[in-house]
Amino acid sequence: MTVAEAEASNHNNSAELPLTTAGSDGGATAKKLTLVPLIFLIYFEVAGGPFGEEPAGQAAGPLLAILGFLIFPFIWSVPEALITAELSTAFPGNGGFVIWAHRAFGSFVGSMMGSWKFLSGVINVASFPVLCVDYLDKLFPALESGWPRKVSIFASTVLLSILNYTGLSIVGYAAVILGVVSLSPFLLMSAIAIPKIKPHRWGNLGSKKRDWTLYFNTLFWNLNFWDNVSTLAGEVDKPQKTFPLALLVAVIFTCIAYLIPLFAVTGAVSVDQSRWESGFHAEAAEMLAGKWLKIWIEIGAVLSSIGLFEAQLSSSAFQLEGMADLGFLPKFFAVRSKWFNTPWVGILLSALMSLGLAYMDFTDIISSANFLYSLGMLLEFASFIWLRKKLPGLKRPYRVPFNIPGLVAMCLIPSGFLFVIMVFATKTVYLLSGLMTAGAIGWYFLMNFCRSRKIFEFSDGAIDDDRES
C-alpha cells in the first residue's frame, strides 16, 4: 500500500489501516518496530543522554540550568510530542511531517517541509561521526588531526551506515543496548554524588553575565526533534496504539536522563561557571570518583553518538522513501533492499551527503539547518491546527484533548520561542538559509519538470490529492 492509499483509507474512516512495508522490489516484509525499541529510537532522535546539557550551566548558572530542563519540556517537548502522536497515528506512513503539510496545504508546501527537514536532518547526521571522533581523541590523541582523524570519520560513517542498512528492527534493539550502556556511568556517578550534595548549590544563579543565546539554544538542541520519528510510522507495529505510549515514556525517560546527572553534579561539585562547557560531566566524574569513571563516560559519549547517528539516519532515509511514495521524488527512492527490506537508496544518499559535510567547518551550516528546522516546525504547528479544521471527521486513534482555540494556545508559546531563535540569527545564517530555501523551491519545480517530461517514474499520490483538494 502506498502512503497516499493509506491516507485515503484513513480519510474514509476505515476501521483499520492495513499497513505493509514490503519494498518496491518485492523484498520480504521487515519485522515491525515494537514498543521498547521505538522508545529508545525516539530517545536517540532527541537526546542520547546528558551529553551536551552542560553549556546551559555555563550560560546561566546551576539554578537556571535546572529550571530550564524542568520547565522547557512542558513548553516545547510535550506539545511537539502530542502533535507527533496525533498526526502519526492519523497518517501512519513513512512521510511523517511531509504527509501532514501536504494534506493540510498541498504539494508545494509538503515539498518545502520535506526539503527543510531533510537538510536539517542530514546535517545532524554529519555531526555525529565528528562528535564520536572528538570523544575518541581524548583517549587516542592521534585522532585529533591529520589523516588519522579523516580516516576515522570516514570509517565510522561507512560502518554505521552499513549497520543501518541491516534493518530498522536491528537498529532499534541496538538503540536499547546503546542507551542502557551509555547511561549506566551517569547513574553510577549520580549515586556516588549523593552523599556529597549540598542543596544550597542548586540555588546558585551564576557568577557572570548570562548568555541567553547559548542558554536557549542548548535547551532547544537537547529537547528537540520529537517529530523525526514520525517518518518511521509505517515501520511500527500497531502504530495507533504504540506511538502515543512510546512518546509518553520517551518524554519522561529523556527528561529524567537529563535531570538526575544535572542535580547530582550541580549539587556535589563546586567549580567556576566557565568550566560548565560540553564534556564537563566527564570532568565531574573524575572529581567524584577518579579517572576510570571519566573514561567510562567518554566511552558512553561515543556509544551515544552511534545511537544518535543510527536514529537520525533512519529518519532521513525513510523520509525520502515516504516522499517517493507521495510522488515528491522519483519512485526509485522507495526501492528497498532484497535482503533487509531497508530503503537503501535513502540510506546511501543520506550517508554520502553527511560524509561530504563531515569534513567541513559547518558551524554556520548547522545554525542554518536549525533555522530551516524552525521554519518547518512553524509549518508543522500550522498544519496540525489546519488539519483539525479541514478534516474534522478524520479518524484520529490518538487525539490531543483540546478544541481548536486550545490547540492554538498550545502552539503559541513554542512558536514564539522559534521566532526568538530566528530573529537572533546571524546574517550568515540568513544568507545560507535563504540559499537552501531557494534550492528547495528549485528542486520542487525540477521534480515537476521531470514528471511532466516523464524523465523519471513518479507515484501519483501528491497530484491526486491536490486534485481532490
Image: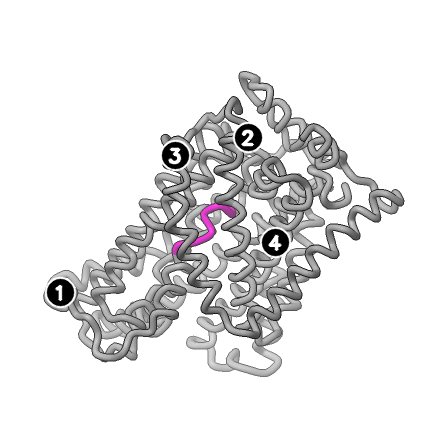
Marks 4 and 3 sit apart, C-alpha to C-alpha, by: 26 Å
Residue type pointed to by label 4 = Phe
Q: Position of residue 7 (x, y in %)?
A: 62, 28
Look at the image and tell me whether residue 278 can be seen.
yes
Say if 15 sits above or below 53 in the image: above
Which residue is label 3 attached to? 245
Does residue 178 appear anywhere in the picture?
Answer: no
Q: Which residues are magenta?
A: 223-229
Q: Alpha-carbon neighbours of circle 4 within 10 Å: few (<14), some, or many (≥20)? A: many
Residue position marked by numbered label 2 in the rendering: 390
**Mark 1 crowd level (few <14, some 14–19, many ≥20, 10 Å Cα):** some
Residue depicted at x 34% and y 60%: 50
Task: Please report the residue visible at 68 percent of the width from the left and 45 percent of the height from the top.
Answer: 108
Density class for disc 3 (Cα within 10 Å; few <14, some 14-19, many ≥20) is: some
Tell me where residue 458 appears, x and y as whole percent.
79, 39
Asked if residue 256 lies left or right of residue 96, the reply is left
Q: Residue furthest front?
A: 405
Is residue 221 placed above or below 414 in the rendered structure?
Answer: below
Residue at the outermost top position? 15
What amino acid does circle 3 point to? Leu
The numbered mark at residue 197 is 1
Q: Provide the residue designation for mark 4.
A: 118
Most foreground residue, 331 or 370: 370
**Residue 98 occupies which quadrant of the picture?**
top right
Marks counted in the figure total 4
Q: Is residue 225 magenta?
A: yes
Quarter occupied by the C terminus:
top right
Helix, strand or loop status at disc 3: helix
- Locate residue 289 relative to residue 165 in the image: left or right: left
Instruction: Kindly identify the amino acid type of the residue bearing the numbered disc 1.
Output: Ile
N-terminal of the pair, mark 4 or mark 3, is: 4
